[in-house]
Image: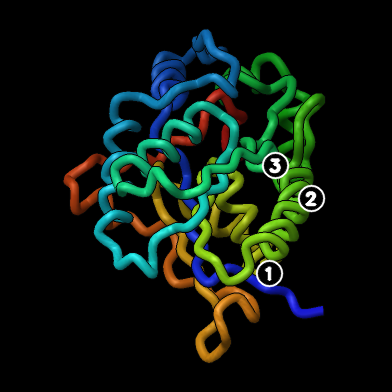
Amino acid sequence: MQVRWPDWLWVVRDGQSAGNVARDAAEAAGLETIEIAWRDIDVPLSELGHDQSAALGEWFGRQPAHTQPEVILCSPYMRALETARLVASHSRLEHVTLRLDERLREKEFGILDRLTRFGIQQQHAQLHEQRTHVGKFYFRPPGGESWCDVILRLRSLQEMITREYGGQRVLVVAHQVIVNCMRYLIEQMDEQRILEIDRQGDVPNCAVTIYRAHDGEAPGAGGMQLVQANFLAPLREAATPVTRAPDAPSAPKP
């Protein structure tokens, strides 16, 4: 049975959130806990996150009609949903289908949620040591997920995308770990390769990773080829600051 991929696929990290701002403040102050009132699912965009999302939407709106999204698949988390809606409104694509999918939610950090790097070292020294030894790809904190767990749910999402949106133009709006794990799947990476990409730096807010059907094949008839990873021209063209902080609440990078 032939797998039908989208003609175009864009994978976008949400704009800067209020959680990113709170995390930066906690780290700078040497605190153990990120002071934020919302559940992770309810964390909204910051003012800068709104500007980043609007800039990205304006960029999509300037593209030729045959290279604009036909459907938006979005994490149900507030910061991602706000990003998707702002992209749609500023690109004048409000008519496209917006579909929420919980498989696109951010990685769950379990017992380490809302803790800074210092907080994890102080409150869960044994887990910190285990995480350092095992690595983030396989380490699962109590009540949370490893990258492998995230990849498992994304495998079923990938199957849905090829089944329901083959030959179409699909925009995915989600979170940093989701962007990297989707790259792992689509580009058929191994643990070493995706973690090396992760070590090079955080996925910038509102960065776009772009794929399209392989050249020489009918749209959707084969696999996808990477056009550009973490594309930032939409923000730079609008003179909008680029931010790269990890999502928060979150466990820090090893």
Q: Tell which tag, 3 or 2, sits nearer the viewer.
A: 3
- Tell me the residue at 46%/15% (across/down): 30
- Tell me the residue at 26%/44% (across/down): 55
Q: Considering only vertical position in the picture, is 124 above or below 200?
A: above
Placement of the N terminus among the 4 image quadrants: bottom right
Location of mark 1 (residue): 188
* Front position in the image: 37 or 131: 37
Location of mark 2 (residue): 152
- Tell me the residue at 73%/74% (across/down): 3
* Front position in the image: 252 or 42: 42
Q: Tell which tag, 1 or 3, sits nearer the viewer.
A: 3
Q: Position of residue 19 (x, y in %)?
A: 47, 22
- Tell me the residue at 58%/42% (across/down): 99
Callout 1–callout 2 Cβ contact below 8 Å: no
Q: Amino acid at mark 2?
A: Leu
Instruction: Classify 10 Å Cα crowding around label 3: few (below 14), some (14-19), many (20 and above).
Output: many
Give the alpha-carbon distance from disc 3 to disc 2, as whole Å: 9 Å
Is residue 32 in sight in this rendering?
A: no
Location of mark 3 (residue): 103
Quick check: 196 left or right of 152?
left
In terms of sequence position, does the residue under pointer 1 or pointer 2 come before the other?
2
The answer to which image quadrant residue 164 occupies is bottom right
Label 2 SS = helix
Give the alpha-carbon distance from disc 1 to disc 3, as whole Å: 19 Å
In terms of sequence position, does the residue under pointer 3 or pointer 2 come before the other?
3
